[in-house]
Image: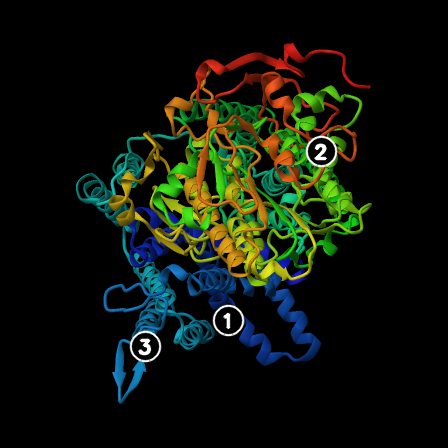
Amino acid sequence: MSFWDILYTLLLKPLQLLFEIIYMMANRVIGNPGLSIIVLSLVMNFLVLPLYRRADAMQEEERDMEMKLRKGVAHIKKTFSGDERMMMLQTYYRQNHYKPTYVLRGAVSLFLEIPFFIAAYQFLSGLQLLHGVSFGPVSDLGKPDGLLSVAGVSINVLPIIMTAINLVSCVIFTKGSSLKSKIQLYAMAAFFLVFLYASPSGLVFYWTLNNTFSLVKTIFYKLKNPGKILSILFSAAGAFLLVYGLFFYSRPSLKRIALFVGCGVLFQLPLLYTLLKKKLRFNLKFTQETANKKAFFAGGLFLSVLVGVVIPSAVIKASPQEFIDINYFYHPLWFIASSFCFAVGTFVIWLGVFYWLAKPSSRVLFDRAVWILSGVAIVDYMFFGKDLGNLSANLKYDNGLDFTWKAQLLNAAVLVVVALVFYLVFRRWKKQVFPILLVGSVALGCMSALNMVSINTSVGEFQAQGGADNAETARFSLSKKGKNVVVLMLDRAMGQYVPYIFNEKPELKEQFSGFTYYSNVISFGGYTNFGSPALWGGYEYTPVEMNRRDGESLVEKHNEALKVLPVLFDQNGYDVTVCDPTYANYQWIPDLSIYDDYPDIQKYITKGRFTDAATKERHIQSNIRNFFCYGLLKSAPLCFQEVLYDGGSYNQGNSGVLYSQQKREGRFISTGISSLFMDCYNVLLNLPGMTDITDEGVNTFLFMTNDITHEPILLQEPDYEPAQYVDNSEYEKAYADRFTADGRTLQIETDWQLVHYHANMAAMLQLGKWFDYMRENGVYDNTRIILVSDHGKDLNQDNSFKLADGTDKALYYPLLMVKDFDSKGFVTSEEFMTNGDVPTLAAEEIIENPVNPFTGKKIDSSEKTAHDQYIINSDEWNTDINNGKTFLPSGWYSVHDDIWNQDNWKKVTDKAVLPPECEQKTEK
């Protein structure tokens, strides 16, 4: 971050974020970008009204003082000169309690207007939602209005209207003011006319509304009872909201109706207060108290450290390398630095501006509010909103964010108690508030420092391993005359989906000719660290066998499994290529150095390699913004978290048109494209380009992982391709029956279920195209291809898959499809298989008596039928935690023969390192 980046983040980005959140919330309720601009203008103007009222009052004080001193100053300037004049003026000012620097008071409104204008300009001028949207006579809010055309020349009318309103306001406001004040305001009006003349009409419309509000505000100042009139207008607006929300709103939902009703009731409070204020007597003792400036700014610092540093650093620390792109390196610590600047700008600078401009009695309220907010925020973060599932590198929860009414009510009750306790503490021990907040800030800072040291260490390890050297574009060969073996692991691909995918796209059977689909398959765990080692290394690397070898670390055994097949084929004369070996060295970005002892093995990282730099930069900028928003979310009451989360877009205005993340509306409609999905999709799209066809009689082996099925998004049907805007409503109506195949029906009741189906379909379609390319180049028949996954996903899409304890067997049902040399047709096999059969299938009949290069044991599948197979039932997938010599104690299932037969499944223990049947002396 440069100095200017820091300054911009401190001063302008908080305002821009405020504009964005208000606008997106309004547009989500109203559904009209033009009307949402009106709501944005009203909300922003009422929010900053106290600021401008105080600024106007200061300006009025300065103007009155100037008028009072004008004659005396003129006399001194006329009578004296040089140093004598200067001394006389200083004396005169001192006698009247005036300082020359007070002249800046007259410019406070201007100083406030500039950052708000810049923030509004940056937000609305770049808001893609306005492009192509008409509003009234304006055909496109994303372009200049061009409402008049004279002699073929378009004239923008909105800037002229804006300036006219501005001039009327200036005439009223500057009546009786000095020429200097008038020139200042008229010059500003002329500046905005010139500057905004060619701007998008949406931006000009917003500023026109602001000028209208300013004019109305100026007129109100001239009225006898402005407060009473305003309260009546508020009441009328509230009545309108009530009627509209209850009877005419076209997009009703319980939460939105409650919003309309709540706003309608709140808008009655000003009138109620006006009518009853004479009968009510408030004993506001705090109005006589002195504000505690130190406590206020200590509270701002506490919130800044919590929201901007502690929460983001905790997220990144959980998996630092997940936030690194080797093809476009950006240190994760900069996300924390940016978030902290965001937070300081919000809680210290801009909240401090409100504090500085507030009346002394109001500052006491600010002191208490910040103290109570600090307590509420820390309680919310520490005790609520836990166990929400996996959080992606886009700061999006896999299973979404949703809280029951019971949880929200409990949270609200606890926070009311917390607020009351903090209020009483403030009343009783007011002087202790500042040291408590200061100590709390230091404590949070120390926690953050430990997190950041851990993050920096992890990133440093990645860089030390030559991470930047892994960005070379992958190339691998397929031979026309030799034997080719391809093992492709699709992370979290669903074996359950294959019949439905091929039912919907029967042309895939021709593209996948020669493949056998295995429909009776298990994985040895529901996550990659449990399910993939056996896939790579065979039955010596099931969770049971890895736990038996309790004298070695898990990472050593995992690395060994990853090397079994590449080293075996390398030793047997094959040209070996490895791409993206999952969790190599237990690193999120695979550590390719585990193959350094085998110079003939080519190794690459392909994930993200085919995504352009501009897209990656947008993804980084999105995360810079969203880390602060995530901090706000985690420190907010549960009833506000879903609104702040906004489907994972965090109310980002351009999330739907930027290549960063996807926001879904129901099951069939979405905006935006997930960069995480595209990082993987683009690899499959470019498989033909990475493939070199050779006429040499060499044998080749390709060992590859792709995460397309692990980063699912909604795709445009029927081609299942990514699109900025997806609407599958019509296709889903026409082909709703496609989810029934072989007498079973796949339940698609949520968008989370549907996006997984889409990602699996997209993978198959792209692989089909690669297989066509292989056919065209004469390398399909002489290639053995194994498509496999490390595990499935528990999406509860088939009730017959439920075990007795409610577990969805689909979690342990991986994809397994095998095409042998010269095989034809597409067939389904019900033979009992596991993904631990992959090494046997890969080496079968082409490597004589294959043995594990590291243990010397024969590679075969005899263990599969020798006893029941044991599946580890653990959710601890994080290798930063589950990285000892054995997997952490967990539950275990046993299964044999037919996974569809419920009687073949048994839960053997709830928590153990090994199933009871396997507890025997471990290997030394």
For numbered disc 1, what is the local secondary structure?
Answer: helix
Residue 451, position as x, y percentages in the image: 70, 37
Q: What residue type is labelled 2?
A: His
Residue at 75 percent of width and 44 percent of height: 572
Q: Earlier in the sequence, mark 3 or mark 2?
A: 3
Checking the image for residue 558, the label placed there is 2
Q: Distance between the residues labelled 3 and 2?
A: 67 Å
Q: Which amino acid does label 3 sit on?
A: Asn
Tag 1 residue = 70
Front residue of 117/6: it is: 6
From the image, state whether disc 3 or disc 2 is nearer to you.
2
Residue 186 position (above or below residue 474)? below
For numbered disc 2, what is the local secondary structure?
Answer: helix
Residue 87 position (above or below residue 362)? below
Which image quarter: residue 193? bottom left
Tell me, yes or no, whether the two marked residues, 1 and 2, touch with CB atoms within 8 Å: no
Which image quarter: residue 76? bottom right
Residue 110, position as x, y percentages in the image: 49, 64
Residue 789, position as x, y percentages in the image: 55, 37
Tell me, yes or no, whether the two marked residues, 3 and 1, touch with CB atoms within 8 Å: no
Q: Which of marks 3 and 1 is nearer the N terminus?
A: 1
Residue 289 position (above or below residue 758)? above
Q: Which of marks 1 and 2 is nearer the N terminus?
A: 1
Checking the image for residue 156, the label placed there is 3
Direction left: furthest residue: 247
